[in-house]
Image (cartoon, grey):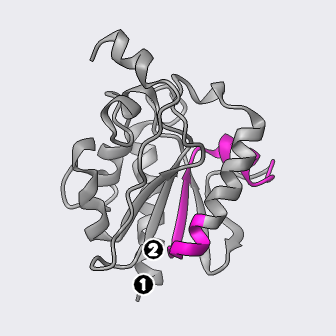
């Protein structure tokens, strides 16, 4: 992918990945902060090499094998979906404004009300704190519910997030998977 492709991807949006009517109900809706430029250029969520979302999704047992970003459509058959707080692509999440994150939180609440996933998993604690006016939120399950939907905050899988190793992320994603599996019983 060329630098020109990446420049052209700035401010683009990509479609959500959501189950259709013939697919299982939405168990977990993963919500990223916003698409990066590689994701916007390819049209696939978490597409930047070095992003740990797809490996961690498999490591934690959400997927039977490690999916490539281009295989994101396979999530729907597993009752999983992907969206973003903010639709527009940027090189870094810190390019987003406070107001964009607040609007994204409102849009996300509306999507959750329509699609009614069992769990909303927001990938990125800092963005969650702003979008949901929860300055003390930490990674893990939240007390807040959106209707009948439980909320879990996960670490950001971006390669820029050096605080969390792939193994530690997989442990947190596994905690969510176990909770989602138990809730479905």
Q: Residue 184 carries which label?
A: 1
Label 1, label 2: how far apart the Cα atoms are: 6 Å
Name the residue furthest left.
Answer: 65
Q: Residue 141, located in which quarter of the rendered image?
A: bottom right
Q: Give the position of the N terminus as an image quadrant.
A: top left
**Secondary element type, mark 1:** loop
List x then y, in percent, for residue 140.
60, 58
The residue labelled by disc 2 is: 180
Q: Residues within 10 Å of mark 2 (few under 14, many from 20)?
A: some
Q: How crowded is mark 1: few (under 14 residues within 10 Å), some or many (20 or more)?
A: few
**Secondary element type, mark 2:** helix
List x then y, in percent, for residue 43.
34, 39
Q: Does residue 165 appear left or right of residue 119 in this picture?
A: left
In this view of the protein, can residue 68 be seen by the observer?
no
Q: Does residue 129 appear left or right of residue 50 in this picture?
A: right
Q: Residue 77, located in which quarter of the rendered image?
A: bottom left
CB-based contact (under 8 Å), mark 1 and mark 2: yes
Q: Is residue 120 above or below residue 166?
A: below
Name the residue furthest bottom.
Answer: 185
Is residue 163 one of those drawn in magenta? no
Q: Give the range drawn in magenta.
A: 111-135
The residue sitting at 62% across, 59% down in the picture is 108
Is residue 131 one of those drawn in magenta? yes
The residue sitting at 57% across, 65% down in the picture is 111
Q: In this view, does 165 lie above or below 72?
A: above
Q: In this view, does 77 lie above or below 60?
A: below
């Amino acid at each position: 992918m060329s630098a020109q492709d990446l420049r052209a991807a700035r401010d683009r949006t990509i479609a959500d990945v959501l189950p259709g009517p013939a697919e299982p109900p939405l168990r977990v809706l993963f919500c990223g902060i916003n698409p990066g430029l590689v994701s916007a250029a390819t049209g696939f969520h978490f597409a930047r090499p070095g992003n740990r979302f797809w490996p961690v999704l498999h490591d934690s047992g959400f997927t039977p094998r490690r999916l490539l970003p281009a295989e994101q459509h396979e999530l729907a058959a597993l009752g999983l979906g992907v969206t973003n707080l903010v639709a527009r692509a940027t090189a870094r999440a810190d390019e987003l404004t406070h107001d964009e994150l607040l609007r994204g939180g409102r849009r996300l609440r509306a999507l959750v009300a329509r699609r009614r996933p069992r769990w909303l998993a927001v990938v990125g604690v800092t963005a969650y704190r702003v979008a949901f006016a929860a300055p003390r939120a930490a990674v893990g399950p939240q007390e807040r519910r959106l209707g009948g939907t439980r909320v879990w905050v996960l670490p950001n899988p971006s390669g820029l997030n050096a605080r969390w190793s792939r193994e530690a992320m997989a442990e947190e994603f596994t905690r969510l998977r176990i909770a989602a599996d138990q809730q479905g019983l």
